[in-house]
Amino acid sequence: MIVGTAGHIDHGKTTLVKALTGVDADRLPEEKARGITLDLGYAYADDGLLGYVDVPGHEKLIHNMLAGATGIDFLLLAVAADDGPMPQTREHLAIAGLLGLERGAVALTKTDAVTPQRQDAARAEIAALLAGTPLAQAPIFPVAAPRGAGIDALHAHLLAAAATHGERHGRGGFRLAIDRVFTLQGIGVVVTGTAFAGRIAVGDTVTVTPPGLAARVRQLRVQDRPAQQGHAGQRIAINLAGDFEKADLARGMWLAAPSLHQPVQRFQGTVQALEALRHWLPVHVHLGTADVTGRLALLEGDALASGAAMLAEIILDQPVGALAHDRFILRDQSATRTLGGGRVLDILPPSRRKRAPERLALLRLLDADDPAQALRAAIECQAAGVDLDRYARSRNLDDPAALWQALELKVVTAADTRIGFSAAGWSQLSGRLLAALAAEHARAPDMIGVEHDRLRRLTLPALARAAFDDLVADLQAAGELAQTGGWLHLPAHRATLAARDTDLWQALRPLLAAAPFQPPRVRRIAQDSAIAEETVRGLLKRVARVGLVYPVAHDHYFTAAAVAQLAAHVDALCGGEGAARAAALRDIIGGGRKVAIHILEFFDRVGYTRRVKDGHVRRQPDAVRQWILQ
C-alpha cells in the first residue's frame, strides 16, 4: 500500500515518515539546509507492505505535492497540535477528495508541545474539518514523532489498512506516472513512479509518452528492493535502455505499454468546482505527475458555481498521456489556488456538437465504472457504432474481445479498427437502409436503383463504409436487397424504358457499341444521327436510370457491357500489379490517357475502386462479378 503524507508546512510530515520507517525522506541538500521539504521524498518500511510518498507542505510547492499525491492508496494527514488545521491542510484535504481518496488517517503531531486541553481542541477542529468529506470517519492518532510517542499505534493501523487493502489488480497495459528521472554511474537512466495499471518485467519493451520514445527495461526495484517484475499499486524504479538521454525524460511523462501511447491535447470529463468557475478559464491542469496549462471549456453553461459539478472539455497547450477515469486537478493561471478537479471520460472527443443533448447524455453514461455498462450505453447512443479498439484502449482493457462477446455485439472490421453494434442497432440500420431505398424508388420509379455510396449517405452519413458493406451483404444474403450493376434496389423493383425511348435507344445503341471503350459523346451522337442534342442527352439520362448505360464522364456514356469489360480489365490490373493506373488501362483499351483517367475516376465514384496515390485499388474484390453478370 502506498501512503501519501499531506498537511501544512512544518507540521511534521517528514519527521513522521522517518519515525515510521527510519528513513529521512528529505534527500536534497537544500532541504536539509533549510529544514523544509521542497520536493517529493520516498521511504519504505522494512515490512515490505508499506511505501511512503512525503510531499512538501508549502503553498508555493503544491505542484510538487500533486505529483506525489496522484496514485497513492492511503492519505496520512499531518496536523500540528499547536496550530491545528491550516490553509494547506484544507487545500491538501480538498485535493485528496478530488483525487478520489477515501481511505486515510490523521496524525496529530507535536502533542508533546501542548497541553491536554489544546490536544482536545485540536481534535475538535480536525473533526469539524473532516466532516462531510470521505475521511469523516478517519481515526486520529496523537504522536510526538521525535520521541516515538504514538508511532507504534499509528504503524499498527497502517499495517492493518494494508492487509485489508489488497493488491491493485494488474490488469490492462502497464502505466507508470514518472515523478523522478536520474542517472546512476554504471547503470544509466532510471525513472521512478507509482504504477497505475498492469504489470512490468525485466526485458519488457515500453514507450515513454507523450514523446513516444521506445525503451527496454533493464533492471527493476520494487518498493526499494531488487525485483524481476512489478505491478499496479507499487512504487517502482526502472532502469531503461534506449535511444535517448536523461534530458529527454521528465516528470509528467508516462511509462506505458506501447499500445497505450496516444497523447492527447484535449479531453472531456466531469469537473467539480471548489470555487466559482467560468467558461474558457485559463488553468493549470495536473494529471498523473504532469502540470500543463490549458483552458476550461464548460459544456453545460457559461459558469459553474462553487461546490457544483458539470461536464467540461479541457484543452491543453501541450499533449499529455491520459485514459478514461484518470483524475485531474485544476489550479488557477498563476498556480496559487486549487480551483477544482475531475475525472476524464473521453480522451478523443468529437470536434463538433459538443453540447448536443445526446452527446452530454453519452458522456454521463461513460462515467460508469463497469466497462460493459458504459460500452452498452455508448452503443445504444451511437447509431454509427462504437470504435471498439479505441474504447478498449481508453479503458485499458485486458481482454476486450470477451467483453464484446458477452454483450453479443455485431463487430465490423474497418481498416485497422473494429466497430461494434448492438443487435437492435444493426436491425435499425437495416430498416433505415430499406426505408431509404423504398423512398428513392417512389421518388424516381424509372431509375434502376441507388448508387452504393449515395445509399450509404441516405442511410446514415456517419456510417463507416465497411459497416455499410456488411449491412448490404447481410440484406442481400437475406434476400431483402438486390444489386444490378452499380445500383442497389429492392428485389421487386424494376425500371423500364417507355416505348418511345426504347425505339430511339435501339436506333442510337449501335453508335455506342461500335467503339465500346471510346464511344462518341452526346454532341457527336446528335450530329451522326441528325437528332437534336437535347433529345439525345435526355434519352441517355433515362437509359442510364435503367442501367443500360453509365455516365462515365460529363456527356460521355458507356454501355453496360462495355463497363463490365472495363471492370474486368481493372480487376486484372489490380490482381497483377496491385493497382490500376491510367497508362496501363490505356494500353489495354487503346485511345487517349484522358479517357482512361475518366474511366478510373468513374470506378472510384461508384465505389468499385478507391484512389491510392497514383493508382486505383479494388474496394471489394468480388464486386467485378456484379458488373459482369448484370
Image (cartoon, helix red, strand yellow):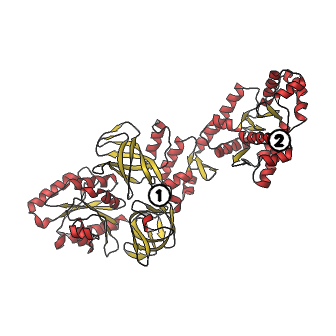
Q: Dot 2: few (<14), some (14–19), or many (≥20) neighbours within 10 Å?
A: few
Please name whichever residue, 334 or 167, is drawn nearer the observer in this view of the structure. 334
Image quarter of residue 436: top right
For the C terminus, give its image quadrant: top right
Residue 257: image x %, image y %?
Answer: 50, 63
Relative to 569, is 7 on the left or the right?
A: left
Residue 469: image x %, image y %?
Answer: 68, 44
Image quarter of residue 304: top left
Residue placed farthest to the bottom in the image? 186
Please name whichever residue, 349 or 593, is drawn nearer the observer in this view of the structure. 593
Please name whichever residue, 612 or 218, is drawn nearer the observer in this view of the structure. 612
Image quarter of residue 557: top right
- To which residue does mark 1 refer? 210
Tag 1 near tag 2, CB within 8 Å: no
* Disc 2, SS: loop
Residue 456 at least partly seen:
yes
The vertical placement of 454 against 287, above or below, is above
Say the numbered circle drawn on residue 592.
2
Please name whichever residue, 557 or 582, is drawn nearer the observer in this view of the structure. 582
Residue 368: image x %, image y %?
Answer: 44, 49
Count up the numbered dots.
2
